[in-house]
Image (cartoon, rainbow, N blue to C red):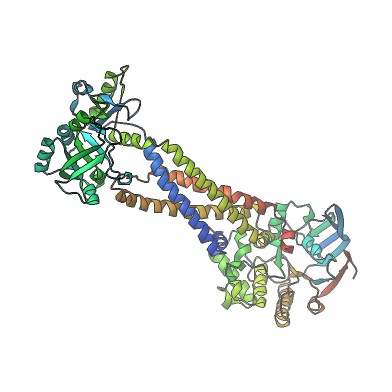
Amino acid sequence: MKYLPLLWAGLLRRKTRTVLTLLSVVAAFTLFGMLDAVRIAFNAPNSVAGLNRLIVTSRFSIIQPLPFAYISRIQAITGVQDVAYAIWFGGIYQDRKNFFPNMAVSVQEYLTIHPELVLPAAQQQAFRHTRTGAIIGRTLAERFDWKIGDKIPLKATIFPKKDGGNIWTFDLVGIFHADRPELQGIERQMLFHYDYVDEGRLQDQGTVGWYIVQVSDPADSDRVALAIDRLFANSAHETKTQSEKDFQRSFVKQIGNIGLIVSTIMGAVFFTLILLTGNTMMQAIRERIPELAVLKTIGFPNRVVLLLVLAEAIVIMLCGGLGGLMLAHALLPVMATATSGQLNLPLTLATWLLGLALMILIGLLVGLPPALRTLRLNVVDALRG
Amino acid sequence: MAHGSKRNPAAPDTQPEQGISTAVDLIRLRGVSKSYLRGKQRVEVLHHIDLDIPEGDFIALMGPSGSGKTTLLNLIAGLDSPTHGSVTIAGQRIDRLSSGELARWRATHVGFVFQFYNLLPMLSAQKNVELPLLLTRLSAAQRRRHANIALQLVGLTERASHRPGELSGGQQQRVAIARALVSDPMLLVCDEPTGDLDRHSAEEVLRLLQRLNREYGKTMIMVTHDPKAAEHALRTRHLDKGTLVG
């Protein structure tokens, strides 16, 4: 504690440089906080325990369809309450930049299994009874200013029509909203009849993209998931039963190994940070050689001078790093709101602890070369200037 | 105080770590030589110096540039070690100490005053004076009290909270003297203490050093080019080409 004034004196000697260095550390750790939240989200262990809704996809790839005939066999498993199914339609409205998720679903079961999807009773009725009917989320309706009664043409990217056409036209019969703010992401979706698409498509008829299974008792979900996958083991279409969250991750993982991408970016960021702050620390200590020589002259042991330089580097890292993580903590909810809950990533304790360890490690790495230089400092030469 | 006839009131109540003899000559150099390697060539800066300085003395070391004054001062202050010969201070062979032991020895036995003051620019005058006391076991309040007394001794109490940049050259040098005094060293080494000051400030600093020698019995060695500065010392020794000539 008694050396604190010396520490501050070193840090505040060139305020602008210290502030700029701090800002670069803040930026690096903000990025670290946000990317590590993504990494943790994508590397979280898969578990279906306690869930009442499971997703059944092909074991090999989520783009591999499953036979429609599986539905009755899944329904027969003890503990399964209801089964819905869906396919990823991937239709484009006018231009690719207008992307939004659109899926063909088994309307009756899908609405039953997804109570969070709030749709007025009359619109529900209309959706059930209109073969070409579609419902959209409130956010999507606002985005394109769509109203009930509008016809929405989607260009097929996966499923061309049997008649050779490529445009599927849907009648907008309902606009839904989520029953909880954190689920606002679903309000960007468009849903329409599986039957309409399946009958009209050129290929893959009689298959589904995935099944959504509602279990009677969430405590039993592990057993049900295992039973489903065992049922289709060694068949032509083996299954993988997982939580909805893991299913969503699988979608994003199609673009590559997210964990590796994130780790690579973080590695590059920290490598740059080490070079930048290392160079700054070297420069800062070089400028203070006469002052450090005076300390050694009046009897400060090498050990104390070395620790002072190391502490300076670690304090910069801790101040900037904690500031950066706090900024990430504040930004993640903003990002979640901006993406309507699609990117709802919390900053976990693991990220804070890993961040803290990195701050100390980088502080030691960048502080050690100038600290060792002070050890080799010849007082007589340094005083002579 | 272990040395000197009167105790410095700023001095902390800490005893020197190593035993000290009561020899009449506080400083004794015998056959001291010092050489450096300059490139591949060995250059001898000091040749076979014998020097005795009694306790309470105030000696001015004079000589032309390159004569070895500062090198001799550094050897006496334990900043450097001789190539040959012995340096005995208060009965202790400091030429035999390791660099860590020398650092501890300097902290308790020597006060330094430099030509360019060498104060830490971000610290107040008081914090600068407190620096040597950070190496003691004194509490923060005790360190503050001792620093204030040292500043009082050099007449700068009212400037305690000022940073070096807010002080004149003469005032900065007085803060440096307070820093040199605060741990009550037996020996004060001053390397051109007035070299960067105007005549008036230089006179003030020299009178202060003289007072510290007379009233507090501090043994002082001052390197200077200035004959007027040397007049304030009790004795003057001349160095030329690494040899004591007078």
Which residue, as the protein is rendered here, is positioned at the far front?
A164
Q: Is residue A184 left or right of residue A10?
A: left
Residue A245 in percent (x, y) is at 30, 36
Residue A263 in percent (x, y) is at 47, 40
Residue in the picture at 27% in, 40% down: A101
Residue in the picture at 57% in, 65% down: B143
Name the image quarter holding residue B205: bottom right
**Residue nearer the viewer, A383 or A273:** A273
Q: Is residue A1 left or right of residue A237?
A: right
Can residue B50 be seen in the rendering of this structure?
yes
Name the image quarter holding residue A345: top left
Which residue, as the protein is rendered here, is positioned at the far top?
A234
**Residue nearer the viewer, A292 or A167:** A167
Can residue A2 be seen in the rendering of this structure?
no
When the figure is inspected, residue A184 is found, relative to residue B223, above or below; the finding is above
Q: Quadrant of the C terminus of chain A?
A: bottom right
When the figure is inspected, residue A228 is found, relative to residue A41, above or below; the finding is above
Residue in the picture at 34% in, 50% down: A335
